[in-house]
Image (tube, rainbow, N blue to C red):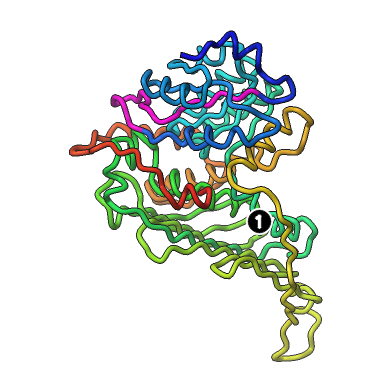
């Protein structure tokens, strides 16, 4: 066991002391214990590379897991997250528990004057996530969410094109997230793909990064008409979802997210009256219109005329990416007031969209954003009450090599 008092004395004063909560053990749920391969262990692994932060403690509900990870990284370990928070060892916590645990743990941290970096999604429902955001605002502490796609040069460049007005007013926004998961993946843990354990399927597990990038660039739509399906797997929740979107200015969009196809595809189109952004397997491309379509349409006298579109080379600036980029930025925001790449409050945007899609399907109606909080809580309560423990599950802790390699 690591000496906590010695760690207090040796901690660097110019670094943020981070406690990671959730490192690969079990988490108490309403239907018993659910296995969770701890993403927290991955976060612990890069902390030594930070010059503005350090791993100061770890926490997991399974004592032997907490102790093993703590000993491996030579930091104190805890079984209760509140004990870690009250230890005096940490300035901030990184929450890597199953989804339902994110809001209550974050709120406990903010009440104790600690900064919070939460894994995605920030919560399962917008109501609970909203409580989390308000607690952060009351505390005055830094709140960030692990949306590492925002750190990629391509997405940073696309965001700048939009902020600089080069895309213009939104006309259309589309996203295709064609991913794949096997039945063996879902059979690897009792919490996976259940309403009680996870609170959703592809929309709450695999798609949040894509949904965040999409809403970060195109904005959050006002109206959502969606369907979800369980098409190819023996699971409670959706393995594909698709929706028609309408934005405040009348622009339309479409989203597909699924885990039933190979090869995998990530394609995003954001079309404005001044330009078009396209992400696909070829990377980021941008076309600019010298004359906006809104002007050309009413000014041109040519029957078959069309606005000229020029493909423009987009400069991609080298920068740090993946999880470490978000964590370093989080630490620098605490120490120096640096602007956050992924503010926690912005985690509401992608969650609003996910909740709206699920609500639209089950209530068979178009849903207006912001989602009615109590209506969604009622729906999720119904789904959780129907949730049943899995049979024949053999818990496995196998790290996704693709996740490790690409930070996804």
Residue situated in front as seen by the camera: 355 or 364 = 355
- Residue 23 occupies quadrant: top left
Q: Label 1: which residue?
A: 155
Q: Relative to 252, does residue 319 appear above or below in the rendering?
A: above
Expressed as whole percent of the image width and height from the top left, the position of residue 244 reads 50, 60
Residue at the image position 65 percent from the left and 15 percent from the top: 10
Does residue 338 appear to the left or right of 179 in the view shown?
Answer: right
Give, as a single range, the part of the protein colored magenta: 17-35
Q: Relative to 11, does residue 260 appear above or below in the rendering?
A: below
Characterize the local packing of mark 1: few (<14), some (14-19) or many (20 or more) Cα atoms within 10 angstroms: some
Indicate whether residue 270 is drawn in magenta: no
Residue at the image position 33 percent from the left and 40 percent from the top: 192
Does residue 13 appear to the left or right of 133 in the view shown?
Answer: right
Residue situated in front as seen by the camera: 37 or 368 = 37
Residue at the image position 29 percent from the left and 41 percent from the top: 188
Q: Relative to 119, does residue 304 appear above or below in the rendering?
A: below
Expressed as whole percent of the image width and height from the top left, the position of residue 50 reads 66, 34
Can you name the residue that lies furthest to the top here? Answer: 5
Q: Can residue 372 be seen?
A: no
């Amino acid at each position: 066991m690591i000496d906590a008092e010695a760690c207090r004395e040796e901690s660097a004063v110019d670094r943020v002391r981070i406690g990671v909560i959730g490192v690969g053990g079990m988490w108490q749920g309403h239907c018993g214990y659910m296995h969770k391969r701890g993403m927290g262990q991955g976060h612990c692994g890069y902390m030594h590379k930070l010059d503005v932060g350090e791993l100061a403690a770890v926490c997991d509900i399974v004592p032997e897991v907490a102790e093993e990870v703590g000993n491996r990284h030579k930091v104190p370990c805890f079984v209760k997250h509140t004990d870690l928070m009250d230890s005096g060892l940490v300035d901030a916590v990184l929450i890597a528990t199953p989804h339902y645990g994110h809001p209550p743990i974050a709120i406990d941290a903010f009440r104790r004057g600690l900064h919070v970096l939460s894994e995605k999604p920030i919560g399962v429902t917008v109501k609970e996530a909203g409580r989390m955001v308000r607690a952060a605002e009351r505390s005055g502490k830094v709140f960030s969410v692990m949306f590492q796609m925002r750190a990629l040069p391509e997405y940073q460049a696309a965001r700048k094109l939009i902020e600089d007005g080069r895309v213009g007013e939104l006309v259309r926004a589309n996203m295709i997230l064609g991913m794949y998961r096997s039945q063996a993946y879902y059979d690897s843990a009792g919490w996976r793909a259940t309403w009680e354990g996870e609170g959703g399927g592809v929309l709450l597990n695999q798609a949040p990064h894509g949904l965040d990038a999409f809403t970060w660039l195109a904005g959050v739509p006002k109206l959502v008409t969606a369907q979800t399906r369980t098409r190819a797997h023996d699971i409670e929740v959706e393995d594909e979802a698709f929706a028609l979107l309408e934005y405040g200015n009348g622009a339309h969009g479409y989203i597909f997210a699924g885990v039933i196809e190979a090869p995998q595809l990530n394609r995003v189109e954001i079309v404005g009256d001044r330009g078009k952004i396209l992400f696909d397997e070829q990377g980021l491309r941008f076309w600019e219109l010298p004359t906006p379509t809104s002007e050309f349409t009413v000014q041109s006298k040519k029957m078959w005329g069309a606005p000229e579109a020029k493909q423009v080379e987009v400069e991609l600036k080298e920068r740090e990416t993946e999880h470490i980029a978000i964590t370093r930025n989080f630490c620098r925001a605490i120490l120096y007031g640096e602007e956050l790449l992924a503010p926690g409050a912005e985690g509401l945007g992608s969650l609003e969209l996910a909740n709206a899609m699920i609500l639209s399907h089950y209530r068979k109606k178009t849903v207006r954003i912001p989602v009615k909080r109590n209506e969604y809580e009622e729906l999720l309560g119904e789904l959780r009450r129907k949730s049943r423990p899995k049979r024949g599950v053999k818990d496995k802790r196998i790290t996704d090599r693709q996740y490790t390699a690409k930070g996804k």
